[in-house]
Image: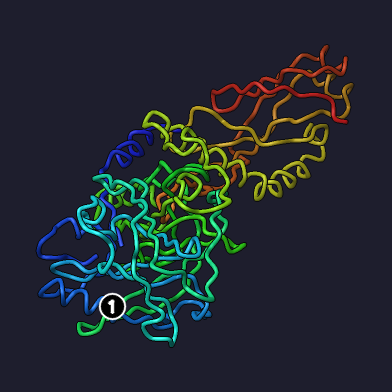
């Protein structure tokens, strides 16, 4: 039951989310504060070009999985501007076609005022020197960026030539399944003011649906997805999100640090006992290939419908969270509460408990969380049950407190099961039971009435 928590959820949902796209502050553009491009200052465009072309890729990031860098279709994207050099991650999706983020591409190139030639390069790992560096030949497409950073973020470039001995990633339209891991291969900048260099590394991540930070990701086919259990920092923008079968599911684009953006709301949840964690975890964002059509990619399945990709309306958000609670509690009941229910039945060797199979049903009207009680599922001996014509038992009740996990997703905490203090009255038609029909049972507990239909057991 929602109780008084709907207002808390919607208040958080209404907070403007300014995403940290994959950057460090530049003196000429405050917008760079919100992207995850790694930037290096320079004095002129010519200096920027020289340093961008000389960028290096190294293999292995401490704390990430061992990677065969030599054949990876993932490279370091460097961008030369008048005042700095930007670096992102990019990856092959065709023989000479590269995917990255739109926010990695300067506006003057996206507007068509300046060519990407002699301004953008992709360097792959290898020992061939300049032969592993490929110049941008053409910007094929770049998404428009929304002001709050919460829209799809992609760009596709054609290189001057096709890199050798590197197989492009195949694009998947499958979307992201909840709790199914994927991996990212990313370029992480080294801390050096003199040389531009990044290390390639791989991490395992997991989708995080229905977070209050971004409740619009509530199904596998939304255009923007959220994920966690891995670290995303400046320079990782444009990294591929790769399925367990080795296909590209999407593009890493941003992260949200709850400690810096909506810490007050998180603190309020903690004070009210609604955050079941020591702190809220950073949440990462990506663009879903299920919902965009890359230009120039051959043999690609049709994208998902606009309707399925479009995020839910504000009116639907409370329903999303209510449903998430219901599903979570129901799964917990099936998984964890059958043993106490069976023990409770065994305790009733001399009363009516043995005449039924039992189940958990919701107890409505609770405001502090959610509760379920034991109610008949079916009756065994119709004659015995009919002769009883109603009975009273010390019932079994399970209570749950509703709240949020460390990614601010709806969850619950079991408060315990109660027996001795609970008196439950069961009333029904003896005539219907005796006839073996499905019979309405009125279950009365704590001044509340629940109606359940009970049939004869098979």
Viewer-closest of 51 and 450: 51
The answer to which image quadrant residue 85 occupies is bottom left
The answer to which image quadrant residue 353 occupies is top right
Please give the name of the residue rendered at 74% of the width and 35% of the height, measured from the top-left corner: 358
Q: Residues within 10 Å of mark 1 (few under 14, many from 20)?
A: many
Please give the name of the residue rendered at 55% of the width and 69% of the height, measured from the top-left corner: 167
Q: Is residue 395 visible?
A: yes
Relative horizontal placement of residue 440, taking residue 107 as reference (left or right): right
**Rendering coords of residue 60 (x, y %):** 44, 82
Question: On the image, numbered disc 1 is attached to which residue?
Answer: 53
Viewer-closest of 76 and 277: 76
Please give the name of the residue rendered at 53% of the width and 45% of the height, measured from the top-left corner: 220
Relative horizontal placement of residue 431, taking residue 161 as reference (left or right): right
Badge 1 marks a residue whose secondary structure is: helix
**Rendering coords of residue 161 (x, y %):** 43, 69
**Rendering coords of residue 313 (x, y %):** 39, 31
**Rendering coords of residue 284 (x, y %):** 38, 57
Relative horizontal placement of residue 105, taking residue 415 as reference (left or right): left
Relative horizontal placement of residue 125, taking residue 425 as reference (left or right): left
């Amino acid at each position: 039951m929602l109780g008084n928590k709907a207002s808390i959820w919607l208040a958080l949902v209404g907070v403007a989310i300014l995403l940290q796209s994959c950057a460090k502050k530049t003196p000429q553009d405050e917008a760079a504060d919100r992207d995850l491009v790694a930037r290096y200052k320079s004095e002129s465009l010519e200096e920027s070009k020289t340093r961008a072309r000389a960028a290096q890729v190294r293999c292995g990031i401490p704390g990430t999985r061992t990677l065969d860098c030599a054949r990876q279709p993932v490279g370091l994207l460097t961008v030369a501007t008048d005042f700095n050099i930007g670096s992102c991650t990019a990856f092959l999706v065709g023989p000479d076609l590269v995917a990255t983020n739109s926010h990695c591409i300067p506006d003057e190139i996206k507007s068509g005022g300046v060519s990407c030639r002699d301004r953008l390069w992709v360097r792959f790992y290898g020992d061939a020197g300049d032969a592993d560096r490929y110049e941008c030949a053409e910007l094929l497409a770049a998404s428009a960026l929304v002001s709050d950073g919460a829209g799809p973020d992609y760009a596709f470039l054609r290189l001057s030539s096709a890199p050798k001995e590197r197989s492009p990633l195949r694009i998947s339209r499958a979307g992201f399944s909840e709790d199914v891991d994927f991996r990212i291969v990313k370029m992480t900048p080294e801390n050096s003011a003199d040389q531009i260099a990044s290390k390639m590394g791989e991490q395992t991540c997991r989708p995080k649906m229905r977070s209050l930070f971004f409740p619009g990701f509530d199904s596998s086919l939304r255009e923007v997805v959220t994920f966690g259990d891995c670290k995303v920092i400046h320079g990782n923008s444009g990294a591929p999100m790769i399925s367990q079968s080795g296909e590209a599911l999407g593009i890493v684009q941003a992260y949200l640090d709850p400690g810096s953006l909506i810490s007050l709301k998180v603190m309020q949840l903690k004070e009210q006992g609604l955050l079941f964690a020591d702190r809220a975890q950073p949440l990462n964002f990506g663009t879903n290939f299920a919902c965009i059509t890359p230009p120039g990619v051959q043999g690609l399945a049709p994208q998902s419908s606009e309707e399925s990709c479009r995020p839910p309306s504000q009116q639907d958000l409370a329903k999303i969270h209510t449903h998430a609670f219901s599903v979570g509690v129901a799964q917990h009941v099936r998984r964890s509460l059958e043993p106490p229910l069976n023990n409770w039945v065994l305790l009733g060797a001399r009363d009516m408990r043995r005449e039924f199979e039992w189940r958990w049903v919701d107890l409505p009207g609770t405001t502090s969380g959610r509760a379920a009680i034991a109610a008949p599922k079916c009756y065994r001996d119709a004659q015995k049950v009919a002769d009883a014509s109603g009975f009273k038992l010390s019932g079994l009740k399970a209570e749950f407190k509703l709240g949020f996990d460390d990614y601010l997703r709806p969850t619950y905490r079991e408060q315990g099961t109660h027996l001795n203090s609970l008196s439950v009255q069961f009333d029904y038609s003896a005539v219907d039971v005796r006839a073996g029909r499905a019979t309405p049972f009125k279950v009365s507990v704590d001044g509340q009435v629940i109606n359940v239909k009970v049939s004869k057991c098979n």
